[in-house]
Image: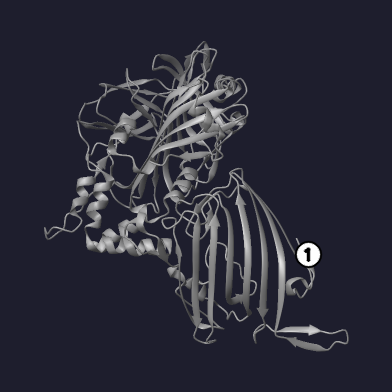
Amino acid sequence: MGKRIIFMWLCLTFGVGMACGQHTIVKGIVTDSVTGEALPSVTIVFKGTNIGTTTDIDGHFSLSTRTPGKVLEVVYMGYDTQHLKVLPGRTNNLKIRMRESEIALHEVTVKPKREKYRRKENPAVAFVRQVIARRDDNDPRNRDYFRYDQYEKIVIAKNDYKPKPKKDGKTGKFDFLSEFVDTLDVGTTILPISVKEKAQTVYYRRDPRSEKTVVKGNKSSGVDEVFSRDGVQQFLNEVFREVDIYQNNIPLFLQRFVSPLSSIGPTFYKYYLLDTLDVEGDRCADLAFVPFASESFGFTGHLYVTLDSAYFVRKAILNVAQDINLNFISRMTIEQDFERGPDSTRVITKDDISVDFKLSEKSKGFYARRLNVYTHQSFEVPEGRQEQIFKESAPVITQKEAYSRTEDFWEEVRPQEAIQRNPNSMEKLMAKLRSVPIFAVTEKVVSVLVSGYIPTSKVPDKNKFEFGPMNSTINGNAIEGARFRVGGATTPQLSKNWFVEGYAAYGTRDNKMKYDALVEYSFNDRKTYRKEFPMHSLRFEYMYDINKLGQQYMYTSKDNVLLAIKRKKDTRATYLRNAELTYSREHYNGISYNAVIRNFREYATDYAQFDRIGADGAVTPVRKYDMTELELKFRYGKNEKFYQTHDERIPITYDALIFNLEHTMSKKGFLGSSYDYHRT
């Protein structure tokens, strides 16, 4: 049992609460009454309510609620609307067969039937063109100022989780997991493994254009606590981007989808006018859409558009087609709600994404939900402290108390739909898991493997020095033989501006001691890591070590134990003594620059000999050479995002524009330089 739990934990697999109240569940399949073909995107709602769903690409649907009506309404363009009675408080399994018909909407007759889809003279296409033409008219960012509060909650859970009792009837160390099981509206049980909440206020100014976010509260708990907090947040922000259906492209899960309101929408999607219905007092048309090619990166779903001259979208439901190969995603649904002001300016009030992940068809996989709720929208001119926010250089300003908010704060800002049914929180689950020795030890081991460092204090606020990176402790190569290294670094808990880092290493074959010592002063306070963005520092480093010629280490250290595994011997190496002074500066707009003054001496080895060839062709061995050089670097990274580790930054945006320019120069005779050169 213990091994199974640890495996689940390593794969991100744990939980939350049991459902309360009496649920009515309706599920089944909708097909054509004649051909038996499954019908996708069929609208199914409880009559007289806004509680409903749509069928997936295979005609299946599932709907669960505690406050249903007694009559289910089934609507699909080209078919007769059906009304079916359901039994409240029970599970209703339905096989719905739809009969073809002709429907009329605002004196326009639509006859889809089986004929080939045509854009010309299609009232649905004409209708969506009107919506697209007005998408910029209602944009709140057309106003001089725009402000709103945003609450975000991200839940990651083990999907369809059902505790399995032991055959012998004995109790297990992890039986308490059943206390944290939760039930979704569709009846699926989940066991949450990570819960994150964030409360912030967004301020927008049109001229000069500026957008600032003030994070007022941020908390997270779960099995992913072993990872970098800010790094995980960056990754989730990139994967679960806020969806703007009014843009041409919608970036999600490191892919780009075509929006149903894209300017190329009518050539990418098929549109259907289905029916009219009330959405919170507004009479709306149900505009369904599906990509021409089911395997393309588009959506199936519905837009509920007001039947007036504003063509205002009150609600949007987007589903990912199952034919596309999207990073193990088996299902994804996006639901958005909008409200409009007196001048028809739109404001989004909810952005809700739920996703099912599966590594294989047989696995139950994982469930993830990202809920954004927007409130207190205002277009008033900011005054006082709010006006000063636009003078901040950082796009995101995190308040000092953001990570230490009390539960009273979260109860005040947490919207009703984000309140979990089970009172057992993620913090309680993690406390119980850590009370089990095998889990506690495994968590510490994984934490060291992920971060690479061993803290000198169990209390994060008192951890002033760390040993590591541990994956560089033992290594080996053809020149040094077995290589042993010990090192460490100070943390921002010792000083937020001054940092010391270094290591000592020894090779059993060459019997040489190598070392590196670094001192850095940061002009801006560091929070977690010395190298965190944005850097503005002055650094001096002195190093003597082996130099493996031609090797580059993008996202790892040169001593990583895995680099010892090679197909061939790595004997092309020298010894290098290097001293350098570096000034680094990074800006939030993506611009960064460095200036490095470097003095080094490189020693020849039996594996990499230095020969000077004279004018007469004579070859003279050279034991070493010296250089002093100036290196200038310029870099521009537009919209670049990355996962920040202790020592490296790993890109997570592969479509960002990156521009690098570097020039190095040296003058023969200057501070012992052996050669003249310029390298760009």
- Classify 352 as above or below 666: above
Residue 637: % across, % down = 62, 48
Residue 223: % across, % down = 33, 53
Quadrant position of the N terminus in the picture: bottom left
Compared across the picture, whether 236 is left or right of 661 comes to: left
Farthest right residue?
616
Residue 544: % across, % down = 58, 76
Q: Nearer the viewer, residue 467 or 362?
A: 467
Compared across the picture, whether 450 is left or right of 89 comes to: right
- Classify 634 as above or below 139: below
How many numbered circles does the render carry?
1
Q: Residue at x 37, y 29 (%)?
A: 53
Compared across the picture, whether 380 is left or right of 660 comes to: left
Q: Secondary structure at mark 1?
A: strand
Q: Amino acid at mark 1?
A: His
Q: Nearer the viewer, residue 680 or 272?
A: 680
Farthest left residue?
169
Asked which colour scheme the image uses, the reply is one colour
Q: Tag 1: Cα neighbours inside 10 Å, few (<14), some, or many (≥20)?
A: few
Compared across the picture, whether 270 is left or right of 5 comes to: right
Q: Which residue is mark 1?
A: 678
Q: Residue at x 37, y 53 (%)?
A: 224
Q: Residue at x 58, y 55 (%)?
A: 537
- Classify 191 as above or below 27: below
Residue 564: % across, % down = 51, 76
Can the viewer see residue 310? yes
Quadrant position of the C terminus in the picture: bottom right
Q: Nearer the viewer, residue 117 or 459?
A: 459
Q: Nearer the viewer, residue 37 or 363?
A: 363
Can the viewer see residue 155? no
* Quadrant in the rendering for residue 415: top left
